[in-house]
Amino acid sequence: MTLVLSRRLTRLLSFAWLLPSLLAPVHACESCSQWMALRLMAGDKPSAHAVEMAGLVKNSGWEGAQRMFATILGSTAAVSPAVAAVAKGAPNPPGRSTLPGVAAATAAVRPASTVSSPAAESPAHPFQDIIDRDKRLGIWETSYVPPGTPPDKKFTLVMQEGDVFLGNGVIYSGFNVNGTIPGPTLVAEEGDVIELTAVNKGEIAHGMSIHAAYTQTSKYFGRINAGQSKTHTFRVNHPGVYMYHCAPGGHAIPMHTLLGQYGIFVVKPKTVKFKMEEVMGRKPDIEIYLVQHELFASGKDAIEGRAAYVMFNGKLFRYADSPIKARPGDFVRVNFLNVGPNLTSTFHLVGIIWDYAYWQGNPTPGNTFTGGQSVIAGPSDSWVVDFRVPPDEGAYLMVTHAFGSATRGAIGILQATKDAERDAVVSADGPSHTPEQLEALKAKAVRIISPSSPGSEELANPYVLPPGVKKLRIQIIGNSYWPKVAVVPPGTTVEWVNEDVFTFYSGEFAGIHDVVTSKGPQDFASPMLGHGEKFSTVLTKKGEYQYYCTPHPYMEAIIRVADPNDAVAAVSP
C-alpha cells in the first residue's frame, strides 16, 4: 500500500511541475504546449488526469487556452467526452478546482510554517512560494494580485488617432489618449488595487505600458486590435511619479510614444511621509502635476531628436498664457515627469530653491534631497519638488533650463498675489476640445504638423528635385517618408530605402514598410522592405501620386510629376 501511494504521489508531483509548461509560453512555445496537450489529453493512451488537466488549463486565464483546445478538438486523435465537454466550455467537475492530492502533496514538501498558512489551504498558485517569500522580505511587494481581486479604483484609457490643438495656431495630427496629449492624469494611493481598462477606438493596433505596475502587463495590454479592449488588475505598492504610454509591441512601442500617446500616473505614499509635510505639519496648498514633452513634424525628426515643439501639459506656453495662481507663503508641490520621448529636461523655477526634492517621487530617506536649483530628468524620469513661495508677490518663471527646449514652448508662470484664489490642483491633462471647437481652430490654424503624413508646410513648400538630377531618393524612417512631398520632372527614377532598423515581427509591430499608390496616373507597389532594402520605379506620366505603407496606413506621402517650368519653387530639405 505504501508503495502504491508513493507512486501516485510521484505522478501527481510530476504533473504539478508539467502544468506550468503547458500554461507558460514564456518557457515553452505555444506549438510545444499544444503538442504536449495532445499527448496528455487525447489519443489512445491519455493521462488518467486528462479531465482535471483540461479544467486547469480552461480556468488558467492563459490567452492560448482556446487555441490549444481548438487543436485538440480538431485533431484526428480520440478525445474523451469529458475532456471535450471541458474544452467546449463546461465548468470543472464540482469541487475539483485542482487535481486530487496535488495541493496536499505540494504542501508536504514545503516548510511547516508555510503548510499551516491560509495560502497553502487555498488552490495552489504556480508561484505561491514567491508570493509567500515577498511577504516576508520587509520591502514593498510587487504589483501582482490574484485574478478577481476587487479594485479600489478603476481607470479607462482610450487610444486613438486624431488631431489636437497645441496653441499658437498649431494643430498636431498624430495619436492621443482619451482625445488629449498628454492623456488623463491618474492618481492613486500606495496599496490601491487598480482595475485598468485599455480601449482601442483607433484604426490600428495599440497597447499600454503602465510604469507604476511592478508586474507583467505586456501580455495583458499589448496588441489591442482596433475596436477591442483589455482589462487587467494590479496593486500599486511603490509610491512615485510614473509614466504610462502606448505599447502595442515591437517597433510600435517607440513609434506610438513619439506620436503622442502617454500620460502621468502618480502613486501617493501612505507608509512613508514627504519630509516637507513633516516640517510644515500639513499637506501642500497647491499641487501641480506637470508633464514636459515634445512633438515632431516628421518621423525623421523624431528619430534624430529634432523637436518641433516642447511644452508643459499639452500646450505651447500654457502657463504663460494662463499662469498658475498662488499666494506668498504657500506650500507648493510639483509632481514633475519628463516624458521626452527624446530630450532631457532641467526643470527650474526662477527665484526658488527647493526645500526638498524626491527622486522618482518616492519620499524614502535615500531618495530625498535638500536644496537645489533644478532637477535633471531624462525621458521617463520624474521628481516631486516641494518649496515655499517667498513672502514677495510676483511672477515665478517655470522653465526647462535647457533653453533650446524652453524657447519651443516649455515656459510657464507661477503668479503669486496676496489673497489670490489659488489653483489648488493643476492637472496634467492636455487641453480638450469638442469636434466643433477643433474644426474652428483648424480653420484658423497657421500650421498643421504630422510626423507621418504631409503637413501644411510640406504641402505648400515641397522638395523640388534640382535641375539635371535624374534620381530622387526617399528615406523611410520613423514610420514616415522623407521628403513627404516632392516635385520631379517626367522620367525621374524614384528610389525608396528603408532606414528603420527594427524588422522583427510584422505589420504595425515592425519597421518593415512598403510603397503603394492610392491615387495617381500610374500605379506602383513595392515588396515589403526590411532595413536597408530599396525599391525604385520610373515615373513618366505627369500628375500627383499619392502613396502609403500598407502595414502602417497612416504613413502617407506625395510625389508630383511636372515639367521643370511648372514645378513649385521650394527650398530643398
Image: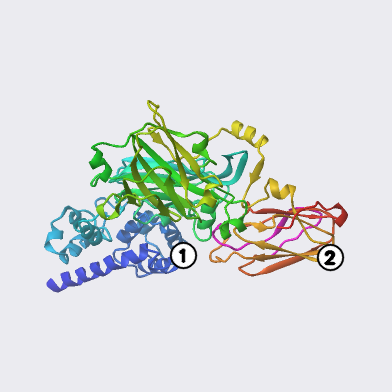
Report which quarter residue 302 is drawn in.
bottom right
| Quadrant where the image shows the C terminus | bottom right
Is 210 left or right of 172, judged from the image as shown?
left
User: Residue 234, can we see it?
Assistant: no
Residue 468, label in figure: 2
Please state which of residues 196 and 354 is positioned toward the viewer in this rendering: 354
- Residue 504 at x, y percent in the picture: 53, 66
> Which label was assigned to residue 75?
1
Is residue 503 or residue 302 the one in the foreground? 302
Indicate the secondary structure of the residue bearing disc 1.
loop
Q: Are marks 1 and 2 in contact (CB under 8 Å)?
A: no
* CA separation in Å, label 1 and label 2: 65 Å
Q: Which residues are magenta?
A: 507-526
Residue in view at x 70 percent, y 50 percent: 458
> In terms of secondary structure, where does tag 2 sit?
loop
Mark 2: which amino acid? Gly
Residue 312's tag is: none
Q: Tell me, what colour scheme is on the image?
A: rainbow
